[in-house]
Image (cartoon, grey):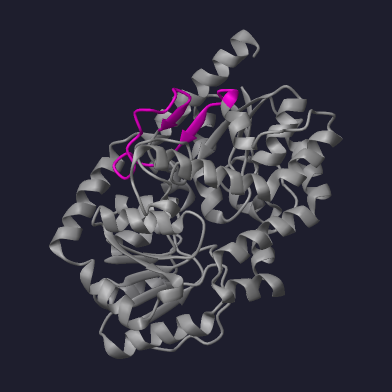
Amino acid sequence: MNIGIFTYGTRGDLQPYIALALGLMDKGHKVTLSATEDFKEFVEGFGISFQPLWGNAETMMNSTEGQEILQSENSIKLMKYYFKVLHDNREPLRKSYYEAISKVDFVIANSMTLPIVSAIAEKQQKKIALTYFMPPVVPTTAFPLGDFDFLNFSWYNKLTYKIAQFFFWQFVKQDTNEYRKELLLPELKENLVAHIDKLKVLDLYCISQSLIPQPKDWETHHKITGFINIPKQKREQHFLDQTPTELKEWISKGDKPIYIGFGSNGIGNTTKFSKIITDILEQTTERILFCTGWSQFDNLPKHDNLFVTKYVNHETILPQCKVGVFHGGAGTLATMLRHNLPVIIVSFYTDQPTWGKIVEQRKLGVHIPVKSLSADKLILAIQRVQTNEIKNNVSAVGQQIKNENGLENAITEIENYFKEKQKYGT
C-alpha cells in the first residue's frame, strides 16, 4: 500500500508517527510522512520519505504575537491564535496538503489536519483512518471528557463530548465549508466529527488502557491500541549515543538529576521559570537537567547542579534521571512511565490538564497547572513523587505499557481496515 501520514504541530505530535511509519514500512508498505517544513531533516534521518506541509511550527510559536500569548498562559487565547494562523495562511496550506495527498493511495490523519485532509480525501475518493495520541473524544457513558469532570453519570458524560465537538466545529466550520465549496463538495450541515463518525472511519487512540480503559459502549471502529514507540532497534540505530560528553560527565558526577523539559511546548514567561529553577537550586541539593526545547531563555542561573541543553535523547537520558517534570504530552508521558520515572505534569493547554488529572488519579505523579506553578509547589511535588507508593505504581504501569504491543496493534488495525476498504471499494 502507498500510505500518507499527516500531522501538524509540535515535535511531540510528530514523533509517534515516526514509529507508525517505520512499523508500516517494515510490513512492506510505502509510507510518506507530511508535517511542517522544519521537520524534514528529523523525519528523513529515519529513512522515511517526507512531503512538506506549509509552515514552520517553531517560528509560529516564537513570533512576537505567539510569545505574547504564551506569556499570558491562557490556553483559549493560544488555541485561537493557532487557528488564526491556519486561517490566514489557508491557501498555501491547502495547496501543500493537496499536493501531498495526490501522491498516496491511503491516508492516516489526526484532528488538527482533519478539516483539510478529510475534504481532499473525499474529493479524491481515498480511504482515511484517524489516529490520536490524546484522551478520547468519542462519546461514552463511562466517563466525562477530562475538561468537564465535575460530575460523572451516564447522560452527562455523553453530553460533555457533544459540547467539545460543538466548540471544535465552531473553530473550523467556516474554513472547512469554504474549502469543501472550492472542491465542489456539499456543505456540511453537521459538525465534522459527527460526519466522519457516520462514515465508520477507523478511529485509533494510541494510548495505554492502563491509563484509560476502552469504554464498552464504543462502536467497533473506535479502538484503544496502546502507546506506540519507535522500535528499540531503530531507536538504537538512529540515536546511537548522541549524548554530548559534557552531559555524560555532569550526570556521572552526582546523584540522579531531575529532568525538566517542555519540548516544543513554548514557554512565554521565561523569567518566571528561571526564578523557579534558581529557587530550587538555592533551597535544595537537587540536580536539574533542563531542556529548553523551543523556548528562548537568556536569563538562566549558573550553578554546578544545573545542566542546560536544548534537547536530549529521552531513551538514553531518562533512565539516568529520577523524576520527570514536563508539560504532559502523551508521547513523553509514555516514555517516562516506560522508564519507571515518577512524573510531575505542568500543564499548559489542550489535553495536558487531562493527562495531569489521570496521573494524579492513578497515583503516578503530581499535576500542577502552569498558572499556579511556584518553586514551593514544585519542591513539594518533587518530594511527594519519590514516595514508595508512587514509585511502585509507576513501575507496575510502566511494565503494562511495555507489554501492550501498541505499535503492532495499530498496524494490524490499519492494514485490516485499508484492505477491507480496498476489497469492497467503499
Quadrant holding the C terminus: top right
Q: Is residue 387 visible?
A: yes
Q: Where 307 sits versus 358, above or below?
A: below
Give the camera-side residue of 394 and 146.
146
Give the camera-side residue of 135 and 283.
135
Residue located at (64% from left, 74% from top) = 67
Predominant secondary structure, magenta span: loop
Occupied quadrant, residue 261: bottom left
Quadrant holding the N terminus: top right
Single out the residue that lies furthest toward the left: 388
**Residue 57, x across and y down, in percent:** 66, 59
**Residue 191, x across and y down, in percent:** 64, 37
Occupied quadrant, residue 46: top right
Single out the residue that lies furthest toward the top: 424
Q: Where 365 sits versus 256, above or below?
A: above
**Residue 269, x across and y down, in percent:** 54, 79
Q: Where 119 sits versus 400, above or below?
A: above
Residue located at (29% from left, 42% from top) = 210
359 horizontally vs 155: left or right:
left
**Residue 323, x across and y down, in percent:** 29, 66
Residue located at (38% from left, 52% from top) = 149
Q: Is residue 41 magenta?
A: no
Residue located at (35% from left, 74% from top) = 249
Q: Is residue 35 visible?
A: no
Single out the residue that lies furthest toward the front: 155
376 horizontally vs 8: left or right:
left
Give the camera-side residue of 124 and 309.
124
Q: Which residues are magenta?
A: 198-224
